[in-house]
Image: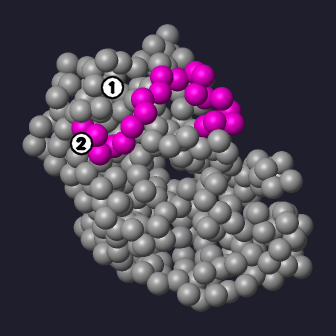
């Protein structure tokens, strides 16, 4: 039997970009999937692909500890993917309290519920972020670097990351942590993000808008590669050398914002469009790149998609949406 057949999986943040693709792949591998959903979003990929009809849905918030404990118990969950969070940097800056409630309190609520279900819980994968590292200078970040997020979103991910490690070291909750680069792919409806926003502008024949000066450097990570990374890690758990460990995942091809925009314009045959550079971004780190040597060596994982191939698939997903 395949390793995911009949496995009972709980996914938070299932209607988000990564969550919808992960749930779809888990269903394809014959897992029993239960999702925590807060909002009904008709335009979300999770809704459009009719994943609602194929999973168990628990309606509620990460801030509701009793609800989480009930869900883990009633559905006899053995695997947890904790993806739920406030993920938009600008929203987090405008509303730090709600961000800390969902990203920090929500994480400890879920981990405490997992601690109270030791008979069933076998693996818990907590989604952190490259932002959890804060500003580490120009070197690619390694998992051993300190977590020192300063801005609201960054700090919330640093806290959630440390809380997850605390639950492993204090209570032996079988936790592993993922720290990914900037995710992109079909289904991201947050058009204030660089990739979907640029694609929408290009397909409409409009000049894309860059909030920064265009020189910020980031890793951009395709959602289908991210799904494979998460499942590769989960497949190998609860192996002792993975528990309480964090793993970086990214494409390994850091680019400036302007380079990403120009790549998208070229793939959309819109090279004549010139981006509008606002140079208004604040509370952001100039350069963040990830060293994924640990994931390659320990998990024998590497991304399958080139950046151009990933962007082409992403653009193709948006064409009918924008039309």
Tell me which corner region of the image, top left, top right, bottom left or bottom right, holds residue 235: top left
Q: Is residue 209 left or right of residue 232?
A: right
Q: State the residue in front, 276 or 258.
A: 276
Residue at 68% across / 33% down in the picture?
49
Q: CA distance from mark 1 to mark 2?
A: 13 Å
Name the residue beneath numbered marker 2: 109
105 within the magenta span: no
Q: State the residue in front, 91 or 140.
A: 91
Residue at 30% across / 56% down in the picture?
101
Q: Is residue 83 left or right of residue 310?
A: left
Q: State the residue in front, 192 or 7.
A: 192
Name the residue beneath numbered marker 1: 71
Tell me which corner region of the image, top left, top right, bottom left or bottom right, holds residue 100: bottom left
Compared to residue 115, the image places residue 18 above or below, namely below
Element at badge 1? helix
Magenta part of the protein: which range?
46-65
Could one spot residue 291 in this view of the protein? no
55 within the magenta span: yes
Q: Is residue 260 left or right of residue 215?
A: right
Q: State the residue in front, 119 or 96.
A: 96
Q: How is the image coloured?
A: one colour
Residue at 65% across / 79% down in the picture?
210
Q: Position of residue 71 (x, y in %)?
A: 33, 25
> Which label's residue is closer to the chain start, 1 or 2?
1
Compared to residue 18, the image places residue 195 above or below, namely below
Q: Position of residue 198 (x, y in %)?
A: 72, 68
């Amino acid at each position: 039997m395949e390793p995911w057949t009949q496995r009972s999986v709980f996914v938070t943040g299932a209607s988000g970009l990564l969550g919808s693709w992960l749930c779809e792949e888990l269903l394809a591998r014959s897992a029993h999937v239960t999702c925590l959903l807060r909002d009904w979003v008709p335009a979300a990929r999770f809704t459009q692909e009719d994943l609602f009809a194929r999973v168990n849905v628990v309606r509620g918030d990460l801030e509701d500890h009793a609800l989480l404990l009930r869900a883990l118990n009633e559905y006899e969950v053995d695997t947890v993917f904790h993806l739920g969070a406030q993920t938009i940097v600008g929203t987090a800056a405008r509303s730090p309290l709600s961000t800390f409630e969902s990203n920090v309190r929500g994480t400890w609520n879920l981990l405490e519920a997992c601690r109270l279900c030791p008979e069933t819980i076998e693996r818990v994968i907590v989604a952190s972020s490259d932002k959890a590292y804060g500003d580490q200078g120009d070197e690619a970040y390694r998992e051993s670097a300190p977590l020192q997020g300063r801005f609201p979103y960054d700090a919330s991910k640093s806290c959630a990351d440390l809380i997850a490690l605390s639950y492993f070291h204090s209570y032996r909750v079988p936790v592993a942590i993922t720290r990914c680069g900037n995710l992109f792919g079909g289904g991201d409806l947050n058009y204030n993000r660089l990739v979907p926003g640029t694609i929408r502008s290009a397909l409409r024949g409009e000049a894309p808008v860059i909030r920064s000066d265009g020189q910020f450097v980031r890793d951009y990570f395709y959602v289908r590669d991210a799904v494979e990374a998460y499942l590769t890690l989960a497949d190998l758990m609860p192996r002792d050398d993975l528990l309480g460990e964090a793993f970086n995942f990214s494409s390994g091809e850091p680019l400036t914002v302007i380079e990403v925009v120009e790549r998208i314009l070229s793939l959309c045959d819109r090279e004549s469009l010139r981006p509008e550079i606002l140079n208004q971004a604040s509370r952001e780190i100039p350069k963040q790149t990830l060293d994924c040597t640990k994931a390659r060596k320990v998990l024998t994982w590497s991304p399958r998609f080139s950046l151009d191939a990933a962007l082409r698939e992403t653009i193709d997903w948006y064409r009918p949406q924008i039309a």
